[in-house]
Amino acid sequence: MAFGRKKSGGRKEPLFGLPAALADLRLSPADRIPGAEDRPKKSAKRSSNDAGGEPPRERKPASSGGKRRKSRRGFSIGRLFYWGAVLGLWAAIAVVGVVVWVGAHLPPIQSLEIPKRPPTIQIVGMDGSVLAQRGEMAGANVALKDLPPYLPKAFIAIEDRRFYSHYGIDPIGIFRAAVTNLLHRGVSQGGSTLTQQLAKNLFLTQERTMQRKLQEAELALWLERKHSKNEILELYLNRVYFGSGAYGVEAAAQRYFGKSAKNVTLAEAAMLAGLVKSPSRLAPNRNPEGAEQRAQIVLSAMADAKFITEAQAQASIGHPSYNVRPAGAGTVNYVADWIGEVLDDLVGQIDQDIVVETTIDPKLQNVAEAAIIDELAAKSVKFNVTQGALVAMTPDGAVRAMVGGRNYAESQFNRAVTAKRQPGSAFKPFVYLTAVEAGLTPETIRTDAPLDIKGWKPENYTHEYFGSVTLTQALAMSLNTVAVRLGLEVGPKNVVRTAHRLGISSKLDANPSIALGTSEVSVIELVGAYAPFANGGTAVSPHVVTKIRTDKGKLLYVRPADQLARVIEPRYVAMMNAMMMETLVSGTARKAEIPGWTAAGKTGTSQDFRDAWFIGYTANLVTGVWLGNDDNSPTKKATGGGLPVEVWTRFMRSAHQGVPVASLPNSQVGWALSNLVQASSQVSPPSPQPPTPLAPVPSAGQYRPPPTRASTQANPNARPEAAAGLDGWLVDRLFGGR
């Protein structure tokens, strides 16, 4: 075979260069450009490919692109399904995480309980009438079965029409609210259910945050699992806020209609249901038109839900039957606030509804309020006086009326109890009492003349002086130099002790100016310190609470009987009453007159006319009036003998109508030393006229100035003598000051 190959092949010579490169070049049929008849069939191509031959290069792109399109279409659907599942899983994990996080910020569900309704404090007057109520929940719980059927239906119709079909959260309602809000481009509709609103009212705050909404949703689900629908609805009606401090339908019905929620009409029920949307804005006492329009919307919703007929809705819309009661902004609320401050000392922490029985007389309270408000309305601009206070109590300290300001709605600051102001000359009775206890009498003579105490020069109101005067005349005319001399004579420390002994509790500075009332006191303590003059000399403790009981009648507190301690001897009480009676007869308070009654008192005006006072009393009542400004700015010469006396007289005249007349204690008893002292004295008036003798001062309660002298002055602009004689003439020269 080898020989044969060698023979047939022959010898080959090696080739170099281009011939060598072209030697093996051969063309095959595949290298030729085929004609139409020479093109192979598809089956031939496949067999050629199967045989290992390479397909034509121009065919590869077409075949590869088709496969990629098929692969991409399958890849998109698969990956979409995959990533959708991944995102859904993460969303579920996120929801679970949020629920766990929100739940971690709630109390343990197993420990959640419906919180007790805060206690109601009902304050009643001495006649049993309700004066005021305190506490967040002013109304008692009312059972659902005791309410008229249309009342709860009104709330369901306007707030949560699917209440009986959802499980605490209403997805349909949320979606509907979202669409409505989107269309209106704002929050025009809410998606919270009644259960969610109850959860918010019971356990959460009113803040608008996503966390609070999520907590609200979880608690709503818990409430639905724990309580029936009717229990939830009953809780809701007894806890929701209706404006003007009224929580629950019972409190709201009492506040706005003066009746129980059990007796409200259909129109009234619709109005109550309408208030829930915006209690402060739609409260009938503030916005009656808005409340009525909202009630009409509720009636239409009830008719649309088939809870009532169209005829019933139209009848109620056309004839509203509500009658709004005025909001509790009267001055009696100053009394209620004062009671709230002392309750903890009397009964400790309050955890149940209570009734507080007081000494307040509602009729006198109304008279006191009108006297303060009317007087300020008429003369506040003229005298630059913006505020006033009044306290009236019996001689044993029972407060019958208290006004702490002209308008409680504008200012809750109690000027009768909390504010402390300079009493001015209203403090002088403590100086004179100290003097008579030291041995002086109302007929004792002292000099009214200029005084210099280490550079301090106290002066009288008109800078005039009247020489020798009795203590009675000096107190009636409120002569400052005599009061200061007496204070120095008996000692400022003894004056302070006397004031504290009678009931002043504020700190008093024992200095010469104490005689002019420069240390600050409150209205109620000054009135209480005058009470011993009206009751014969025993100390009192001003009080307003007599009993405290639960709403079921269990007694929690009864005021114990006072241990009366004598602080003034009867003879000194008689002397002081005689001197202060003269203040109303011929002194600075001559306008203070109560027909048929013997009264006494003292006016007071502080420095620069900042405070005007009058404290006056009978055997029936001790009443004090203060007028001034909260910022302690001066008034336009408002004196104690002016506005305060007018307020006092108006109040006391009304308060004494129909009351049996009684005299002041010991006011007709003679003094043992009255015959041993000078029976008369003289005063030199500041005029070129000769001195006019003063009438003698007999026993207490009998002193009267001499008759009026006829005026002989020809000048029509000259000031005539006062009708009360010489003392009256002197008082007129003082312009009624102090």
Image (spheres, helix red, strand yellow):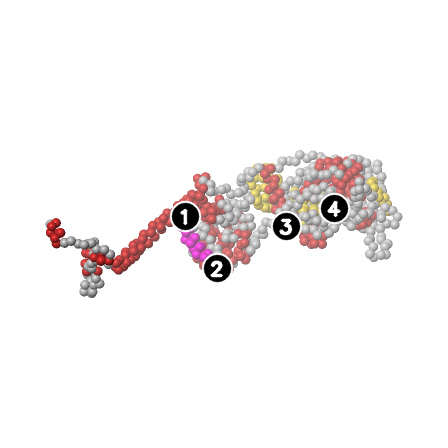
Task: Sort mark 3 into few (<14), some (14-19) or many (20+) by Cα contacts within 10 Å.
Answer: some
Residue tagged 3: 407
Tell me if residue 178 is in the magenta stretch. yes
Q: From mark 4 to mark 2, how far is it between C-alphas?
A: 67 Å
Residue appearing at x 80%, y 48% in the figure: 462
Q: From mark 1 to mark 3, how far is it between C-alphas?
A: 48 Å
Give yes or no for contact between labels 2 and 3 (Cβ–Cβ under 8 Å): no
> Do we see residue 164 in this rendering?
no
Task: Sort mark 1 into few (<14), some (14-19) or many (20+) by Cα contacts within 10 Å.
Answer: some
The residues colored magenta run: 164-182
* Lower position in the chain sequence, tag 3 or tag 4: 3
In this rendered view, identify the residue nearer to me: 292 or 696: 292
Residue tagged 2: 314
For residue 356, the mark is none
Assign a secondary structure to mark 2. helix
Kind of residue sitting beneath label 4: Gln
Residue tagged 4: 607
